[in-house]
Amino acid sequence: MGSLVNFRPETDPAELDLVEACRRGDRRALHRVFTTHAPYIERLLGRVVGPSLEVDDLLQSTFMAAITAFPRFRGEAHVRTWLARIAVRIAQERLRSASYKRRVDLPSLDERADHNDRSAHVEHDLDARRRVERMYLHLNAIGVKKRVAFVLHVFEGHPIEEVAALAGASVTATKSRVFWARRELIKRASRDPLLAEWARKAKS
Protein backbone atom coordinates (compact mmCIF):
# COMPACT_ATOMS: atom_id res chain seq x y z
CA MET A 1 0.00 0.00 0.00
CA GLY A 2 1.05 3.57 -0.60
CA SER A 3 2.39 5.85 2.05
CA LEU A 4 0.13 8.10 4.08
CA VAL A 5 0.86 11.19 2.02
CA ASN A 6 -1.85 13.19 3.74
CA PHE A 7 -0.96 12.08 7.25
CA ARG A 8 -0.86 15.06 9.62
CA PRO A 9 2.71 16.48 9.47
CA GLU A 10 2.93 16.96 13.23
CA THR A 11 2.33 13.27 13.84
CA ASP A 12 5.18 11.32 15.40
CA PRO A 13 6.96 9.31 12.66
CA ALA A 14 6.79 6.28 14.94
CA GLU A 15 3.00 6.53 14.94
CA LEU A 16 3.01 6.83 11.15
CA ASP A 17 4.98 3.58 10.89
CA LEU A 18 2.62 1.93 13.37
CA VAL A 19 -0.42 3.03 11.35
CA GLU A 20 1.16 1.68 8.17
CA ALA A 21 1.62 -1.68 9.88
CA CYS A 22 -1.99 -1.63 11.08
CA ARG A 23 -3.18 -0.90 7.57
CA ARG A 24 -1.37 -4.03 6.43
CA GLY A 25 -3.15 -6.03 9.14
CA ASP A 26 -0.09 -6.55 11.33
CA ARG A 27 -1.49 -8.14 14.48
CA ARG A 28 1.28 -6.92 16.75
CA ALA A 29 0.80 -3.36 15.58
CA LEU A 30 -2.96 -3.59 16.04
CA HIS A 31 -2.49 -5.01 19.54
CA ARG A 32 -0.09 -2.20 20.42
CA VAL A 33 -2.50 0.48 19.18
CA PHE A 34 -5.47 -0.99 21.00
CA THR A 35 -3.54 -1.56 24.22
CA THR A 36 -2.27 2.02 24.16
CA HIS A 37 -5.63 3.66 23.55
CA ALA A 38 -8.02 1.23 25.27
CA PRO A 39 -8.12 3.10 28.63
CA TYR A 40 -9.10 6.38 26.97
CA ILE A 41 -11.67 4.81 24.64
CA GLU A 42 -13.17 2.80 27.50
CA ARG A 43 -13.53 5.93 29.62
CA LEU A 44 -15.04 7.82 26.68
CA LEU A 45 -17.63 5.10 26.09
CA GLY A 46 -18.42 5.01 29.80
CA ARG A 47 -19.05 8.74 29.78
CA VAL A 48 -21.34 8.56 26.77
CA VAL A 49 -23.47 5.55 27.73
CA GLY A 50 -23.16 5.86 31.50
CA PRO A 51 -22.02 3.33 34.12
CA SER A 52 -23.25 0.40 32.07
CA LEU A 53 -22.19 -3.22 31.89
CA GLU A 54 -22.21 -2.79 28.10
CA VAL A 55 -19.02 -0.71 27.98
CA ASP A 56 -16.76 -3.74 27.48
CA ASP A 57 -18.89 -4.93 24.57
CA LEU A 58 -18.86 -1.47 23.02
CA LEU A 59 -15.08 -1.31 23.42
CA GLN A 60 -14.71 -4.61 21.58
CA SER A 61 -17.09 -3.39 18.87
CA THR A 62 -14.99 -0.25 18.47
CA PHE A 63 -11.79 -2.21 17.95
CA MET A 64 -13.43 -4.68 15.60
CA ALA A 65 -14.72 -1.78 13.51
CA ALA A 66 -11.26 -0.21 13.58
CA ILE A 67 -9.63 -3.40 12.29
CA THR A 68 -12.03 -3.37 9.34
CA ALA A 69 -11.56 0.35 8.69
CA PHE A 70 -7.78 0.59 9.10
CA PRO A 71 -6.99 -0.19 5.42
CA ARG A 72 -8.98 2.95 4.52
CA PHE A 73 -7.41 5.14 7.19
CA ARG A 74 -5.40 7.95 5.61
CA GLY A 75 -4.21 9.76 8.70
CA GLU A 76 -6.74 12.58 8.61
CA ALA A 77 -6.44 12.63 12.40
CA HIS A 78 -4.32 11.13 15.13
CA VAL A 79 -5.08 7.49 15.82
CA ARG A 80 -6.68 8.20 19.20
CA THR A 81 -8.98 10.80 17.66
CA TRP A 82 -9.89 8.42 14.85
CA LEU A 83 -10.67 5.62 17.31
CA ALA A 84 -12.71 8.06 19.40
CA ARG A 85 -14.84 8.93 16.37
CA ILE A 86 -15.56 5.25 15.80
CA ALA A 87 -16.39 4.80 19.50
CA VAL A 88 -18.77 7.76 19.51
CA ARG A 89 -20.55 6.46 16.41
CA ILE A 90 -20.96 3.00 17.94
CA ALA A 91 -22.17 4.47 21.24
CA GLN A 92 -24.72 6.61 19.41
CA GLU A 93 -26.01 3.61 17.50
CA ARG A 94 -26.37 1.69 20.75
CA LEU A 95 -28.22 4.53 22.46
CA ARG A 96 -30.63 4.72 19.51
CA SER A 97 -31.32 0.98 19.40
CA ALA A 98 -34.75 -0.16 20.49
CA SER A 99 -33.23 -2.80 22.76
CA TYR A 100 -31.06 -0.34 24.69
CA LYS A 101 -31.67 -0.54 28.39
CA ARG A 102 -29.38 1.25 30.77
CA ARG A 103 -27.92 -1.09 33.38
CA VAL A 104 -25.91 0.16 36.32
CA ASP A 105 -23.63 -2.12 38.28
CA LEU A 106 -23.94 -0.77 41.81
CA PRO A 107 -22.45 -3.09 44.44
CA SER A 108 -24.53 -3.58 47.54
CA LEU A 109 -23.54 -2.12 50.89
CA ASP A 110 -22.64 -5.60 52.12
CA GLU A 111 -20.15 -5.90 49.28
CA ARG A 112 -18.57 -2.54 50.07
CA ALA A 113 -18.35 -2.79 53.86
CA ASP A 114 -19.69 -4.67 56.83
CA HIS A 115 -23.43 -4.01 57.11
CA ASN A 116 -23.02 -2.79 60.69
CA ASP A 117 -20.02 -0.58 59.94
CA ARG A 118 -21.02 1.88 57.24
CA SER A 119 -18.23 4.41 57.44
CA ALA A 120 -18.70 8.02 56.37
CA HIS A 121 -16.38 7.33 53.43
CA VAL A 122 -18.54 4.44 52.19
CA GLU A 123 -21.75 6.42 52.60
CA HIS A 124 -20.26 9.39 50.74
CA ASP A 125 -19.05 7.14 47.95
CA LEU A 126 -22.46 5.49 47.60
CA ASP A 127 -24.19 8.87 47.56
CA ALA A 128 -21.92 9.96 44.75
CA ARG A 129 -22.69 6.81 42.78
CA ARG A 130 -26.41 7.33 43.30
CA ARG A 131 -26.12 10.87 41.92
CA VAL A 132 -24.28 9.57 38.85
CA GLU A 133 -26.99 6.97 38.36
CA ARG A 134 -29.71 9.60 38.60
CA MET A 135 -27.84 11.91 36.23
CA TYR A 136 -27.76 9.25 33.54
CA LEU A 137 -31.41 8.40 34.09
CA HIS A 138 -32.20 12.00 33.16
CA LEU A 139 -29.73 11.97 30.28
CA ASN A 140 -31.58 8.97 28.87
CA ALA A 141 -34.59 11.22 28.35
CA ILE A 142 -32.58 13.65 26.20
CA GLY A 143 -32.08 13.19 22.46
CA VAL A 144 -28.99 11.15 21.57
CA LYS A 145 -27.21 13.87 19.57
CA LYS A 146 -27.74 16.46 22.32
CA ARG A 147 -26.77 14.00 25.02
CA VAL A 148 -23.53 12.98 23.30
CA ALA A 149 -22.51 16.58 22.59
CA PHE A 150 -23.21 17.58 26.20
CA VAL A 151 -21.34 14.63 27.70
CA LEU A 152 -18.29 15.07 25.48
CA HIS A 153 -18.10 18.81 26.17
CA VAL A 154 -19.16 19.06 29.82
CA PHE A 155 -18.25 15.68 31.33
CA GLU A 156 -15.26 14.78 29.15
CA GLY A 157 -14.00 18.34 28.71
CA HIS A 158 -13.50 18.40 24.94
CA PRO A 159 -13.66 21.83 23.26
CA ILE A 160 -16.72 22.40 21.07
CA GLU A 161 -14.63 22.10 17.91
CA GLU A 162 -13.36 18.66 18.95
CA VAL A 163 -16.85 17.53 19.94
CA ALA A 164 -18.11 18.56 16.52
CA ALA A 165 -15.34 16.56 14.85
CA LEU A 166 -15.94 13.48 17.00
CA ALA A 167 -19.68 13.55 16.37
CA GLY A 168 -19.44 14.46 12.70
CA ALA A 169 -21.43 17.68 13.14
CA SER A 170 -20.93 21.38 12.51
CA VAL A 171 -19.65 23.63 15.28
CA THR A 172 -22.89 25.62 15.19
CA ALA A 173 -25.03 22.51 15.55
CA THR A 174 -22.82 21.22 18.35
CA LYS A 175 -23.09 24.47 20.32
CA SER A 176 -26.86 24.32 19.97
CA ARG A 177 -26.99 20.69 21.11
CA VAL A 178 -24.89 21.40 24.20
CA PHE A 179 -27.04 24.42 25.08
CA TRP A 180 -30.36 22.59 24.81
CA ALA A 181 -29.06 19.47 26.52
CA ARG A 182 -27.82 21.54 29.46
CA ARG A 183 -31.15 23.33 29.66
CA GLU A 184 -33.17 20.10 29.59
CA LEU A 185 -30.91 18.38 32.10
CA ILE A 186 -31.02 21.28 34.56
CA LYS A 187 -34.81 21.38 34.30
CA ARG A 188 -35.08 17.68 35.06
CA ALA A 189 -32.41 17.69 37.76
CA SER A 190 -33.99 20.63 39.59
CA ARG A 191 -36.98 18.37 40.37
CA ASP A 192 -34.75 15.53 41.60
CA PRO A 193 -33.84 15.74 45.31
CA LEU A 194 -30.49 14.05 44.67
CA LEU A 195 -29.50 16.53 41.96
CA ALA A 196 -31.26 19.74 42.99
CA GLU A 197 -28.06 21.25 44.39
CA TRP A 198 -26.16 20.45 41.19
CA ALA A 199 -28.95 22.03 39.13
CA ARG A 200 -28.89 25.17 41.26
CA LYS A 201 -25.13 25.57 40.78
CA ALA A 202 -25.39 24.82 37.05
CA LYS A 203 -27.88 27.64 36.59
CA SER A 204 -25.49 30.22 38.05
Image: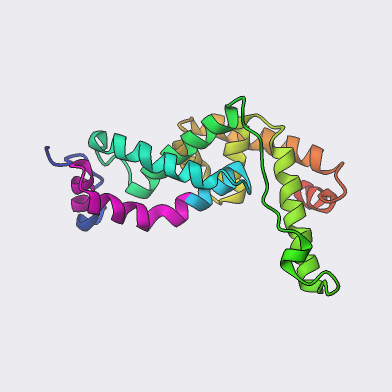
Q: Nearer the viewer, residue 45 or 169?
A: 45
Q: Is residue 80 left or right of residue 181?
A: left
Q: Which residues are magenta?
A: 16-41
Instruction: Please state which of residues 21 and 184 is positioned toward the viewer in this rendering.
Output: 21
The percent coordinates of residue 154 (x first, y second) are: 62, 48
| Residue 38 is covered by the magenta coloring | yes
In the displayed structure, does residue 58 sit left or right of residue 154?
left
Determine the main secondary structure of the stretch shown in magenta.
helix
State the image coordinates of residue 83 (x, y, percent, origin top left): 39, 44
Q: Is residue 165 above or below residue 110?
A: above
Which quadrant is home to the N terminus? Answer: top left
Residue at image point 76% right, 46% down: 134
Query: Residue 187 sits in which quadrant?
Result: top right
Whether residue 100 is visible, yes or no, is yes
Q: Is residue 124 above or below residue 176?
A: below
Which x, y percent locates residue 125? 74, 64
Residue 75: image location, x then y, percent: 26, 42
